Amino acid sequence: MRVVLAEDLYLLRQGLTRLLEAHGFTIAAAVETGPDLLAALLSERPDVAVVDVRLPPTLTDEGLQAALAARREIPGLPVLVLSQHVLQLYARELLADGTGGVGYLLKDRVFNADQFVDAVRRVAAGGTAMDPDVIGRLLQHNAGSEPLQRLTPREREVLGLMAEGCSNSAIAARLTVSDGAVAKHIANIFGKLELAPTEDGNRRVLAVLTYLNGAVERSADG
């Protein structure tokens, strides 16, 4: 799996490079500025990008803007954002195209290599990996969204854990319920959000995007 990595701090960039390589990833490019990131994404077309939001030259939002520009050129390009802060606007922009393959993790909440590597793989596969604080901020913005109003509090709780990237069994363990109960909640979620079955099985991602983004354009074929 090929990765383009963007991080302006040398030691962190080197550390992420070695960590990912140790878990079987190939680093197609490791860059430190926004312009270099955009150039690398467009030329390398990696399986996933791991991107710090704030990159030189201004250390504001170059990383995210480069990732957004690349996704416009390469629809569905998987992007995992690493940030020191929850930046709600940036998260919403990243989710706005409704294609999945999106993650937003807080650097100080990544506690071990397995957690991080799992998030990279999940985003590369078209899924989501969202920090709970990011989910909370997005839901504050989208609290009045009509699709969310159809869900029970338990169903919203299940969907929130899906957004974090939890499997059915992990959700069951977190909520202390059976796997069957989780499957029933998820089926109810799909029904209430009017997500028809698709050949590629992407209803789970579409449900999460509806939850996070408030209103995601959906079609029968995904």
Image (cartoon, grey):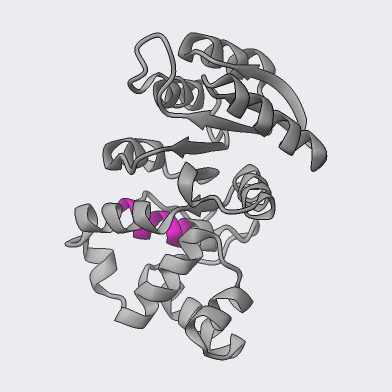
Determine whether 149 is above or below 208 in the image.
below
Residue 87's quadrant in the figure? top left
Q: In the rendered image, is residue 204 in sight?
A: yes
Determine whether 211 is above or below 168 in the image.
above
Residue 170 image position (x, y, % from top left): 60, 74
Screen quadrant of the N terminus: top right
Residue 162 part of the magenta-drawn span: no
Q: Is residue 141 left or right of residue 32?
A: left
Q: Is residue 188 left or right of residue 45?
A: left
Write the start and end of the magenta stretch as one range. Answer: 206-213
Q: Which one is in front, 51 or 42?
A: 51
Residue 207 part of the magenta-drawn span: yes
Q: Which one is in front, 192 or 120?
A: 120
Residue 216 image position (x, y, % from top left): 36, 51
Residue 93 image position (x, y, % from top left): 34, 36
Q: For the view shown, which residue lies furthest in the left direction?
A: 144
